[in-house]
Image (cartoon, rainbow, N blue to C red):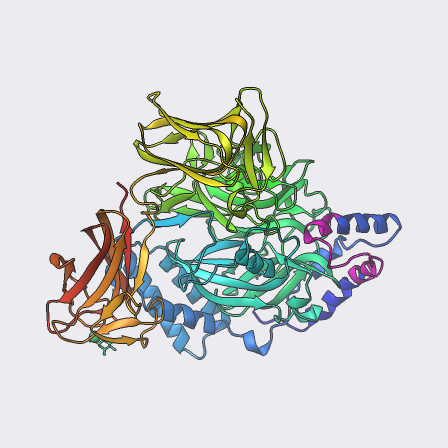
Amino acid sequence: MFMSGGGDSAVSAVLLPVNSVRGKTMTFTVRRSPRRWGPLVAATLFALASAGHASPGSAAVDETQAQPELQTAADVTNADGLETLVSDYETRIPTEYTIDSWEPFAEALTAAADVVEDDSASESEVADAKTELQTAAEELEVLQSTFATITNNTFWKDTAGNPIYSQGGGVFKFGDTYYWYGVHYRGAESYLANPTKKYDDQVSFVSIPVYSSQDLVNWKFENDIATTSTSLGRLGGTMGDAGWIGRLGVAYNENTGKYVLPVQMWHPAHEGGVLFLQGNSPTGAFTFGNFQPQIVNSPTQATGDQTVFTDEDGQDYLIFSNSEGRARAFVSKLRSSDSLYAEPAVEIGRDSSGREGNAMFKLDGKYYMCASDLHGWNTSVNYCLDSTQDRIQGDYTDYYTMPGTQMDYSHVTQTGFFITVEGTVQDTVIYAGDRWADFAWNGIGYNQWVPITKEGTGIRFHSMSQWQFNATTGEFRVAPGNNYILNPDIQADRIIVSNVVGWTRTGSGGVTNVNGGANGSRFALQVSNGSGVRQQMQVPAGTYTLGLHTKGSGRVTVTGADGTVHTLNVSSSSGWTKRELTGIVLPAGTATVTVTGGSGNLIADQFSLVRQGGTDPGSATRHEAEGSGATCTGTIDANHTGYSGSGFCNGANADNAYAEFTVQASAAGTASLSLRYANGGTTGRPGDLIVNGSIVATTAFASTGSWTGWTTQSVTVQLRAGANTVRWDPTTADGLPNVDYLDVAQAAD
Ligand code: GCU
Ligand code: CA
């Protein structure tokens, strides 16, 4: 959209009252915790308003803030974004999708490619082509789909092996691809480097990274779409001048064909408000679009917390709390002409104790808004309300606690955002929890994701340390490495309590959490002689291992649903000692873990109850074809993009040009081998799969259409404990396709 020059001066005119108010608010400093500036802004503004000064929340803000930033020559065209989209979609392989879903997509792709070629195409033609292509791509139905493993309580890595620095953002689906936007803070790096201490207020802004994924598990770093040097347009200066950048989300505007990122900003000269950035492609650079200090109907300038929710009809909303006290929850439509402005808000919930981390999802036609306690990045249950008339800005229930979040305070997180996955089999919502706690030593990892499903007339949060998700069907399952004990590290409370969350007291003696957990962790459980705690959990039938770290003496038992008691006697130790009880056979049903103190106190931490059969069998180990444990009869090349690691194996075109991997198995048993390859030839390049010297299968390695068209072929084999050789030997003189990596996933039991 081209804007005439008139808007700019109108905008600066209305900023004047804000500036004049700012003149009186010299008490602001960036050194304050960003979590506290909201109420402070409000309090100060209130004081000024009572003293007869203008408040920035006047009606005039509504009209004049509506003017977006003038477009610069660099972004007057949105066609470069379309070009990126087209070249990405040209790598999709028709045979991986149903014919019915491929045809409309192929048509939209051809039409979009024509628009890219057409120099006279207008901005709106480009926007239409982009929207149609994304819509068609969203409808693509994958023929085969697989489960991928999500492991919580770790620092996540991207597909290149670098840490994922993404917090307080959101995941959005454009076409067939999920994009994850968040904020990279300096404190995240400190925390990763040393997770055994607290990092208060280390929230200096580094960048807004974007990652892409098709399975919501493997994330590829795409770009830093905004950095400290991103210009703040008419405000002057750059994003590096802001005291706080956070809580962002992305919307796609069908009218402009642009992606819009509403960001919560606090700036020493402009105070709080929503900064709107926009870009032509989901992964390109974003530039200044608008700054809106206050949303009409919200009592205070700035938002308390905010996320973006996109409804099924494509309409985007800002879900937020007011900054002062955060008692009110609002839904505000993003203006449909360009999404650069939040329209007057509708209040959907109120709780005088304050709620933050506000985020929305939709399941079965119903809207749910959930939020956390208001205690600064602390962990809490999720407080939700849901729509009673299936209207996003209609009536809602009162707040209630989401079932499943009480035992471990939402897997030791604060509400971050939700991802709604409409699967071919079921709809599943992913709860994306933030474990930031000022990057504070409160369990490992910033991101903890768990599924939410409908249960009866309500919803349920399924707290798991490890689970597997199928992004196509929407199905999930507990992963074999899951720890069935909740709040196992005694981290959820974060303050000293005598009723440790998730654990029920038995007996009348002393129970508490104490500072100084095992392995540098923050807290441990302490039970005095004869007293104790227990926790009950649902387990599938299997053989389990109980693990924990202890100091002092006592006893831990695991009682199965059949009443059989498995006892681990803990002999006295003065330092932290790891204890383990293996071979615990449990029938399906309720198991009970009971901890009892011996003479003196028992201090215990890092509990685990995991099914035996490989510690982490669900998550695959990747072996790059260019890696040291692999042999490539040919050359390691890097001339066809899309490979992982630093290259791929281009085998010689000969029938003995094999590729071989050395694979370690923790135990003998079944394993799934997935080989990623590209075959740009027109015919298949079959190969014999030889495991430890015996041919066990022949794989077809069908054409993938191009040398950049990477795909994965999986085979199930038996491995022996220890080292195994896995070799693919071509059966024709064409040799093998290009080989990227081998993923090995050992099955449970
Ligand atoms: C092309 C392609 C190679 C590939 C080779 C082949 O040369 O660039 O990457 O390995 O064909 O047919 O095997
Ligand atoms: Ca080759």
| Position of residue 373 in the picture relative to residue 729 (left or right) | right
Give residue 350's quadrant in the image: top right
**Above or below, 737 relative to 615:** below
Report the front residue among 571 and 8.
571
Give residue 453's quadrant in the image: top left
**Above or below, 138 relative to 330:** below
Region of the chain picked out in magenta, as a range: 18-39
**Above or below, 547 relative to 736:** above
Q: Position of residue 529 (x, y in %)?
A: 54, 24
Ligand 1 shows up in the quarter that is bottom left
Residue plotted at (58% across, 59% down): 190
| On-image quarter of the C terminus | top left
**Above or below, 176 relative to 576:** below
| Position of residue 327 in the picture relative to residue 196 (left or right) | right
Report the front residue among 211 and 466.
466
| On-image quarter of the N terminus | bottom right
Q: Magenta includes 38?
A: yes
Q: Magenta includes 29?
A: yes
Q: Is residue 608 visible?
A: no
Q: Position of residue 430 (x, y in %)?
A: 45, 45
Q: Position of residue 583 (x, y in %)?
A: 31, 33
Residue plotted at (62% across, 71% down): 229
Residue plotted at (14% across, 73% down): 734
Q: Is residue 20 visible?
A: yes
Determine the residue located farthest toward the right in the rendered image: 51
Give residue 542's quadrant in the image: top left
